[in-house]
């Protein structure tokens, strides 16, 4: 590493004395010993979070303009006086300034020993670099030994302004090691406050004290450039001068993620078996194993149950075209509660206890692989020791109220116009799980080919529908589908035209499991679909209050013919009625899945109007649609009487998109009396810069059998610069039940944030699970991903 101080020697041998002059060494010198060592500190500790200008710490001294290290230029020296007490000693006195590319050094006095090449700087020593400022009372540099020592230092990193102090900094350039003794680090501004004290002479004195919101302090820190490691001993985290965390030792790399303790979480959890809320404490430790491997071990203590250990191992590996990415999570505990009382279940309104179980666990694997161009695979798999695991244990709390969750293994291969896949789709049964068909397995191939505006598609699929429990009463089968499709499509700026001919050939091979009530072992049928769809786009320009807009009028028609084919003896494996959506007006099948393909002869008409900005961005949208049936529909899900209505209900869509408001709604109104039957509405409203409302309302079968009316609403409100409140409600109006409620209050300072949230979740029969959580974030040091804002986004899918 190049060094600043040999330039002193070359300069002083040529200049004996000077007084109040600017001196220049006609030689380009790069950053010196101090610059190279303190550059390590920037790499190590420059971890401050982005802050507003008002929240950034004060400068320890006003930063000076520093040229780039890459600039070519001389080293300039300024001093009030330059003297030579004897042959080998040179002294610079008063306002010493050394300027060179990449660095400026200030000092009150500098001494240089020519024979030993030792340099001593005294007074207010300052080192200014492009990314770092250092202050010290003394600096001692031995150029022959390539060592340096700085006493009573302050340092600050630019532009984050992260700063700290060190009683002593020792540098060994040969070993590429810097040691900081009694060092501190913070990203917070210094707060000054005064207090009055009484002296021995009964005089009142005003004392000014300083403090920061949080600060890390170390007995010593070793920065090893050769191994690219940082080793700290006796680390203490102080919050408003109160110690809150201690670690005797830490070791992390300069260039990569750091191993060490992550911030803990505190909370409370009330499971079905508990009569009161149980406290829990979660402490994660992160292991940075390699650039593409890491591991997080979390110890969770749950009152009345014991110690829970959870480990998440992640890896990412890329070799040529092969990429592997996976996360394996394992959780285990010896449950004191269930070992004593057994697993809890509900019998009506009463809690009853089943078999005792001590060892409880769960495993989860989420993986994605890219084996070769076009060949990929995905895995999402869960296993648990018992169905109540997530309801009782506070891990992955999104599963605590669900009855099951999907798990699958899937492989895809795409090349040119071909796509093939194979999957194994299963369900992890949880509390009160229904009996679901699983695909064990499903394989499929699709092919498409374009001939100008003409397109040919072919789908071939085979699915094994299986129920992996013995005490069920449902039929099982293997279903094979072969679906060729021919379509002709023209798309223009003013409209489109599309014609489809589809042949759906299905074959069922029913298993002899004692539940086959069809009387047949094989079922075959072919259902044809013929569709003609067309639409036009009319536009006009208009202005309102000097603003230019575009209005569109978009009529769309579809003629659909599906001849009747008797499918009443086919069991329902993956088929149900479609959910509410405006686009379903133009669906070619009124059912989901393939076990029923609805017969029809119908004309669908819809009219949509949009208002766009001058640049084409959507602003307002409204649409109205209805289906005219030209014959009765004989195919039904449950072999009921044919549907004989001549018109469908009215379907209406509305939309608003502005900078602060997004609204989308689809509604279904009775064609007999225009009464509202179904509705699905979503709103996102940013009513201030920092406050927003999120809403999702679903109404099904209004005032009809099977009615369901639910509202999910969440809001965050900025109360002032520091305080923010949030709430989430999921309410079932049909049964007058709170499905889930959570409230949160958050204090957000420049340097830290604290958040308290309380959650209530309905389990069943009026029983509720209660959970509270408290988290603290030290900005620039660590954050938590479990904030209420993230919770709200996940719940309302915005």
Image: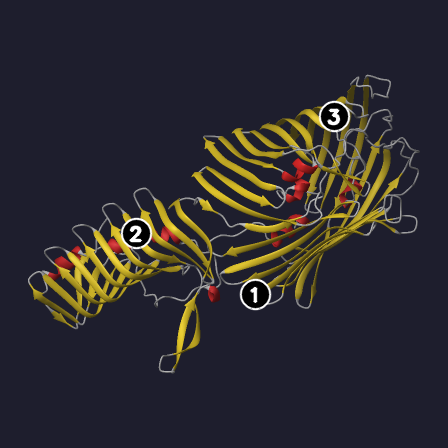
Check disc 1: other Cα within 10 Å, few if <14, some if 14-19, many if 20+: few
Earlier residue among tags 2 and 1: 2
Q: Quadrant of residue 579?
A: top right
Q: CA distance from mark 2 to mark 1?
A: 38 Å
Earlier residue among tags 1 and 3: 3
Q: In the orientation shown, which residue stands out farthest toward the left?
A: 87
Residue 307 circle label: none
Given residues 556 and 594, the one toward you in this image is 594
Q: Is residue 568 visible?
A: yes
Which residue is identified by label 1?
Answer: 722
Which residue is identified by label 3?
Answer: 469
Q: x, y percentage for residue 181? A: 31, 55
Rendered position, 204 above or below 303: below
Q: Secondary structure at mark 2?
A: strand
Color theme of the render: secondary structure
Whether the residues at callouts 1 and 3 have beta carbons within 8 Å, the answer is no
Q: Secondary structure at mark 1?
A: loop
Identified at 18% across, 50% down, the residue is 145
Given residues 737 and 768, the one toward you in this image is 768
Comparing labels 1 and 3, the label whose residue is closer to the camera: 3
Q: Secondary structure at mark 3?
A: loop
Check disc 2: other Cα within 10 Å, few if <14, some if 14-19, many if 20+: many
Whether the residues at callouts 2 and 1 have beta carbons within 8 Å, the answer is no
Residue 659 placement, left or right of 36: right
Residue 124 placement, left or right of 605: left
Check disc 3: other Cα within 10 Å, few if <14, some if 14-19, many if 20+: few
Residue 179 circle label: 2
Q: x, y percentage for residue 627? A: 85, 42
Q: CA distance from mark 3 to mark 2?
A: 65 Å
Identified at 59% across, 54% down, the residue is 774
């Amino acid at each position: 590493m190049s060094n600043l101080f040999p330039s002193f020697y070359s300069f002083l041998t040529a200049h004996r004395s000077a007084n109040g002059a600017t001196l220049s060494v006609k030689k380009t010198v790069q950053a010196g010993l101090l610059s190279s060592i303190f550059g390590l500190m920037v790499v190590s500790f420059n971890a401050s979070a982005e802050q507003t200008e008002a929240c950034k710490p004060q400068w320890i001294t006003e930063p000076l303009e520093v040229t780039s290290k890459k600039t070519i230029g001389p080293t300039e020296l300024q001093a009030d006086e330059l003297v030579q007490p004897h042959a080998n000693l040179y002294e610079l006195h008063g306002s010493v300034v050394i300027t060179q590319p990449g660095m400026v050094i200030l000092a009150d006095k500098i001494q240089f020993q020519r024979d030993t090449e030792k340099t001593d700087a005294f007074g207010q020593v300052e080192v200014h670099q492009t990314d770092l400022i250092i202050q010290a009372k003394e600096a001692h540099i031995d150029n022959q030994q390539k060592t340096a020592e700085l006493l009573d230092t302050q340092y600050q990193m630019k532009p984050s302004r992260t700063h700290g102090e060190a009683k002593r900094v020792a540098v060994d350039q040969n070993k590429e090691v810097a040691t900081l003794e009694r060092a501190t680090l913070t990203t917070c501004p210094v707060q000054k406050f005064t207090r009055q004290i009484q002296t021995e002479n009964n005089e009142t004195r005003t004392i000014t004290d300083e403090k920061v919101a949080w600060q890390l302090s170390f007995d010593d820190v070793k920065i090893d450039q050769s191994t690219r490691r940082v080793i700290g001993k006796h680390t203490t985290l102080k919050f408003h001068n109160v110690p809150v965390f201690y670690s005797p030792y830490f070791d992390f790399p300069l260039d990569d993620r750091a191993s060490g303790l992550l911030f803990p979480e505190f909370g409370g959890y009330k499971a079905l078996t508990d009569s009161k809320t149980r406290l829990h404490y979660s402490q994660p430790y992160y292991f940075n194993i390699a650039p593409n491997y890491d591991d997080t071990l979390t110890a969770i203590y749950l009152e009345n149950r014991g110690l829970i250990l959870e480990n998440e191992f992640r890896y990412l590996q890329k070799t040529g075209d092969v990429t592997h990415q996976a996360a394996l999570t394992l959780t285990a505990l010896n449950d004191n509660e269930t070992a004593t009382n057994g697993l809890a279940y509900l019998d009506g309104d009463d809690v009853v206890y089943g078999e005792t179980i001590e060892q409880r666990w769960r495993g989860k694997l989420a993986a994605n692989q890219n084996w070769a161009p076009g060949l990929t695979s995905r895995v999402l798999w869960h296993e648990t020791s018992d169905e109540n695991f997530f309801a009782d244990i506070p891990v992955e709390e999104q599963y605590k109220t669900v009855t099951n969750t999907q798990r699958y293994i899937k492989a895809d291969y795409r090349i040119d116009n071909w796509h093939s896949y194979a999957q194994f789709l299963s369900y992890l049964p949880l509390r009160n799980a229904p009996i679901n068909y699983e695909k064990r397995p499903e394989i499929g191939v699709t092919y498409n080919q374009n001939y100008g505006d003409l397109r040919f598609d072919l789908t071939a699929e085979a699915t094994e529908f299986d129920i992996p429990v013995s005490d069920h009463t449902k039929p099982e089968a293997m279903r094979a589908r072969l679906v060729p499709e021919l379509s002709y499509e023209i798309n223009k700026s003013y409209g489109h035209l599309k014609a489809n001919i589809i042949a759906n050939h299905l074959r069922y091979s029913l298993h002899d499991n004692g539940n086959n009530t069809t009387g047949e072992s094989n079922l075959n049928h072919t259902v044809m679909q013929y569709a003609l769809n067309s639409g036009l786009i009319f536009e006009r320009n208009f202005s309102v209050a000097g603003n230019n807009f575009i209005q569109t009028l978009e009529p769309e028609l579809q003629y659909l013919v599906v001849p009747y084919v008797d499918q009443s003896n086919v069991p329902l494996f993956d088929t149900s009625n479609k959910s509410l959506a405006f686009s379903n007006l133009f669906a070619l099948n009124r059912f989901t899945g393939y076990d029923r393909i609805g017969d029809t002869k119908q004309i669908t008409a819809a009219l949509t109007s949009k208002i766009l900005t001058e640049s084409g961005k959507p602003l307002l949208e409204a649409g109205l649609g209805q289906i005219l049936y030209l014959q009765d529909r004989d195919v039904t899900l449950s072999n009921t009487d044919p549907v004989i209505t001549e018109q469908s209900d009215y379907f209406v869509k509305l939309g608003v998109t502005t900078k602060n408001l997004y609204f989308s709604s689809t509604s279904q109104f009775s064609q007999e009396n225009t009464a509202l039957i179904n509705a699905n509405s979503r709103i996102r409203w940013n009513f201030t810069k920092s406050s927003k409302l999120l809403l999702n309302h679903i109404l099904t079968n209004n005032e009809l059998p099977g009615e369901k009316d639910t509202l999910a609403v969440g809001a965050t409100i900025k109360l002032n610069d520091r305080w923010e409140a949030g709430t989430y409600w999921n309410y079932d109006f049909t049964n007058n039940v709170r499905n889930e409620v959570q409230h949160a209050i958050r204090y957000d300072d420049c340097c830290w944030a604290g958040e308290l949230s309380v959650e209530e979740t309905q389990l069943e029969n009026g029983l509720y699970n209660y959970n509270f959580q408290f988290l603290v974030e030290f900005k620039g040091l660590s954050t938590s991903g479990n904030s209420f804002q993230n919770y709200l986004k996940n719940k309302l899918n915005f």
